[in-house]
Image (cartoon, rainbow, N blue to C red):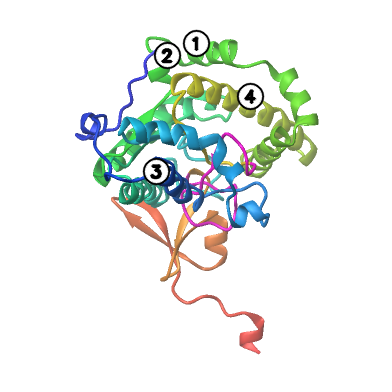
Amino acid sequence: MSTTVDNGSERVQELGRPRLHRPGDDVGSVATQILRIVFARRRSAESKSLCDLAPCADCFAPHLGKVIRYLEARVPVHFIIPAFPAKSRNRRKTLGRLPDMAETLAIESLQGFCDQISAVYRPGAIVTICSDGHVFSDALGIPDGHVDDYGDELRRIIRSTGGGSIGLYGLRDAMPEMSWDERRQRLLKEHSDGIDVLRAAVRTDPAALRMFNGIHRFMVEDNAVLLPELSATQRRNRSKETAYEVVQRSQAWSSLMAEIFPDAVRLSIHPQANHSEKIGFHLLRTQDSWLTPWHGVVLDDGANYTLVKRMHAEELGARVVWRNSRPSHFVLGTRPETEAQRG
C-alpha cells in the first residue's frame, strides 16, 4: 500500500527536510499558537457554545501531542483532510463538473493556512488532501472518468498556486494496480464494520446521527433535481439508502487514512464536536456549515467572496463570470432592494 503523496511541487523534498524553529521558543507554547490558527477556521457542531467562541484545553488535547512531536522533530506539521471528491451533479448547486473559482480559492486558502503557521513555526505545515471521489463515485452516479478529470484540474490549480504545501492522495495511491470496483470492495472489506453496525450507530451515537443527517440532506436536495420522475416518498427512501452507503464508505476511507497517516493532525470538512479527534475546518467563507466548494459556487459581492448554492446566487440576480472558456463564479453588482427600501 503506497504512502507517496503527489503534491505537484518542486518543494516536496524540501518540505520533508528538518529545519530549525526559533531558538528559545517553548515547544508547548508554539504548538498552542499553531492550534489557535487551526481553530480560527473551525466548523463546530456545537455552534455558540463556550468552546466554539474560545477553544479550551480539552479542545486542543487530542491534537497537541501530535503537533508537539512535529515541533520536536523540527519538520513541517502534517495535516490531512478528506476532501475535494468531485463536483455535485446538482446544477442548482454547482456550475459544472470541473473545478472552478470555488476550488481555486479553497486551495489558496489552504496554502495561506500553511503560510500562517510558518509565521509562528518556521518549518510551517503541509496539508495532504485525501481525495475521496473514487470512494463513493459509483454510489452517487458520478463516472470514475469524471472524478479523474476533476482531480487532474485540481492538480493544475495546486501547481499554479505555487506554495508547495498542498499534496493529493487518493484511492489509486492507496491501492495501485486494481480496478476501481476492486479498490472499493477491498476498502469496505478491510475498513468497514458493515451497514447494520452503521445503522445501529446512527440510532445511538450523536456524531454518527449528525453525519448521517448532513449527508441525507444533501441526497434529498440532489435527488429532487436528479430524479424528478420519482415521488417525494421514493426520493426520500432512495436518499436514505444512498446516505448510509456514502457514510459507510466515508468512514472506511477515514479509517484507512488514519492507518496510512497515523501521526497527522486530522481535519474534516464536516462540523465536528468540540473535543473530537478531528477538527471541522472551513475552506471558504459561507453561511452554511455543511457547504463545500464542490457543492456550491463563489459569489463576489464586491466586498467578499462567499460560498453559496448556485440557485441562491441566481435568486440574487448575480451574473456568471467565465474564465478559460468555462463558467467560474458569480458577481453581484447592486443588491436587490428590500420592500422596506422600496417603500
| Res 220 quadrant in image | top right
C-alpha span from label 4 to label 3: 26 Å
Q: Amino acid at mark 2?
A: Met
Q: Are marks 1 and 2 in contact (CB under 8 Å)?
A: yes
Question: In front: mark 1 or mark 2?
Answer: 2
**Mark closest to the chain's N terminus, 3 or 2:** 3
Q: Which residues are magenta?
A: 273-293
Mark 2, secondary structure of its residue: loop
- Where residue 116 appears, as percent x and y from the top left, is 35, 51
C-alpha span from label 1 to label 3: 27 Å
Binning the other alpha carbons within 10 Å of mark 1 as few (below 14), some (14 to 19) or many (20 upward) gives few
Please tell me whether residue 287 belongs to the stretch shown in magenta: yes
Between 198 and 257, the residue placed more toward the observer is: 257
Q: Amino acid at mark 3?
A: Pro
C-alpha span from label 3 to label 2: 25 Å
Q: Which residue is mark 4?
A: 248
Q: Which residue is mark 2?
A: 175
C-alpha span from label 1 to label 4: 17 Å
Binning the other alpha carbons within 10 Å of mark 2 as few (below 14), some (14 to 19) or many (20 upward) gives some
Q: Residue at x 44, y 19 (%)?
A: 260
Q: Tag on residue 182? A: 1
- Describe residue 45's horizontal placement relative to residue 19 as left or right: right
Q: Which residue is mark 3?
A: 99
- Describe residue 324's horizontal placement relative to residue 134 as left or right: left
- Describe residue 25's horizontal placement relative to residue 268 as left or right: left
Mark 1, secondary structure of its residue: helix
**Mark closest to the chain's N terminus, 1 or 4:** 1
The quadrant of the rendering that contains the N terminus is top left
Q: Are marks 1 and 4 in contact (CB under 8 Å)?
A: no
